[in-house]
């Protein structure tokens, strides 16, 4: 699966519009278009069930093929799904192929082979922790073998965290108080970076020099312990420094 060249701009457009989405249906429509532009075929956003509890009541959004969703939930495939089970063990996003088969390997492989028949051949999963500590996940699916580098997957990560945050807000989850590391000006600069603005554009918007914006971005990356601005946006959304809506 090849990612399209404008994936970063498309995700930042979604981030900028997300706060205006007033319903889960509106989020669903925007997500379907954005996920398709990223090159994925479908996705699911869901909470994670306790052992021997059903997945279906925890699903927030799904664009999986209906027949596959029905089979997956009716057969309780989550209990043997390497991707779903791996979310319990990591906070880091991962490619489907990197998820170990922790339970019955034969059953897990059969389930994954069936998924391929429905157009879920490969994918990328983002574990998410809510304000109340509840575990969730945003899983992207592809009809083909995933062909994406760190920048493309960071964009998908940002999309997942932003969309999930908006959905939880629409469902009424209270936002936590955050011990903030960034100054108000740094959050302002990072917000415009999340909206896809360059350092020069941000300087013009805020009425400060481009060099000052670059200094702020350097300080932000240092404080959040990340290597680039895209990672800083994701880290700030996850920690609550930035609100994704």
Image (cartoon, rainbow, N blue to C red):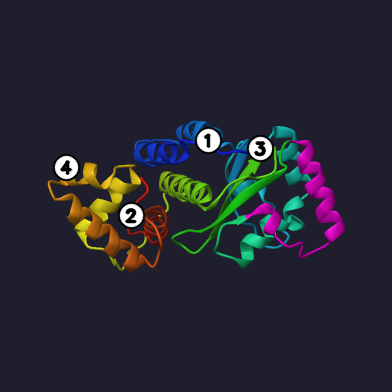
Q: Residue furthest left?
A: 207
Residue 127 x/y as whole percent:
56, 57
Between residues 199 and 52, which one lies in front from this camera angle?
199
Give the mark nearer the N terminus: 4 vs 2: 4
Quadrant of residue 22 within the rendered picture? top left
Q: Residues within 10 Å of mark 1 (few under 14, many from 20)?
A: few
Q: How far, Cα to Cα, is label 4 from label 2? A: 21 Å
Residue 138 x/y as whole percent:
56, 49
Residue that numbered label 1 is attached to: 4
Between residues 98 and 74, which one lies in front from this camera angle?
98
Give the mark nearer the N terminus: 2 vs 3: 3
Q: How far, Cα to Cα, is label 2 from label 1? A: 27 Å
Q: Residue at x 51, y 31 (%)?
A: 33
Q: Is residue 144 magenta?
A: no
User: Quick check: can you spot residue 53?
Assistant: no
Give the mark nearer the N terminus: 2 vs 1: 1
Q: Nearer the viewer, mark 3 or mark 4?
A: 4
Give the mark nearer the N terminus: 3 vs 1: 1
Residue that numbered label 2 is attached to: 242
Placement of 121 over or under 212, stated as above or below: above
Q: Residue at x 41, y 48 (%)?
A: 169
Q: Nearer the viewer, mark 4 or mark 2?
A: 4
Q: How far, Cα to Cα, is label 2 from label 3? A: 30 Å
Instruction: Please provide the residue range marked out in magenta.
Output: 95-118
Q: Main secondary structure of the magenta part?
A: helix
Residue that numbered label 4 is attached to: 204
Residue 47 x/y as whole percent:
58, 53
| Label disc, if present, on residue 64 of the rendered structure | 3
Q: Secondary structure at mark 2?
A: loop
Q: Secondary structure at mark 3?
A: loop
Placement of 51 over or under 166, stated as above or below: below
Q: Secondary structure at mark 4?
A: helix
């Amino acid at each position: 699966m090849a990612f399209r060249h404008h994936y970063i701009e498309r995700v930042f457009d979604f981030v900028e519009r997300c706060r205006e989405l007033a319903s889960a249906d509106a989020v669903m429509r925007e997500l379907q278009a954005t996920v398709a532009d990223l090159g994925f075929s479908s996705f699911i956003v869901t909470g994670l069930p306790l052992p021997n509890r059903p997945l279906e009541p925890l699903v927030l959004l799904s664009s999986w093929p209906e027949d596959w969703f029905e089979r997956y939930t009716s057969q309780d495939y989550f209990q043997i799904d390497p991707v779903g089970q791996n979310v319990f063990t990591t906070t880091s996003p991962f490619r489907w192929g990197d998820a170990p088969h922790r339970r019955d390997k034969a059953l897990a492989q059969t389930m994954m082979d069936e998924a391929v028949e429905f157009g879920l051949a490969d994918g990328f999963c983002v574990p998410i922790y809510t304000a109340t500590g509840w575990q969730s996940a945003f899983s992207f699916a592809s009809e083909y073998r995933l062909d994406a580098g760190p920048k493309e997957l960071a964009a998908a990560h940002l999309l997942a965290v932003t969309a999930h945050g908006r959905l939880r807000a629409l469902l009424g989850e209270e936002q936590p108080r955050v011990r903030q590391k960034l100054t108000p000006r740094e959050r302002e600069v990072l917000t415009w970076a999340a909206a896809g603005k360059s350092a020069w554009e941000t300087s013009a918007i805020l009425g400060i020099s481009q060099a000052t914006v670059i200094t702020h971005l350097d300080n932000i990356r240092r404080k959040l312990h990340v290597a680039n601005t895209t990672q800083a946006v994701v880290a700030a959304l996850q920690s609550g420094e930035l609100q994704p809506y």
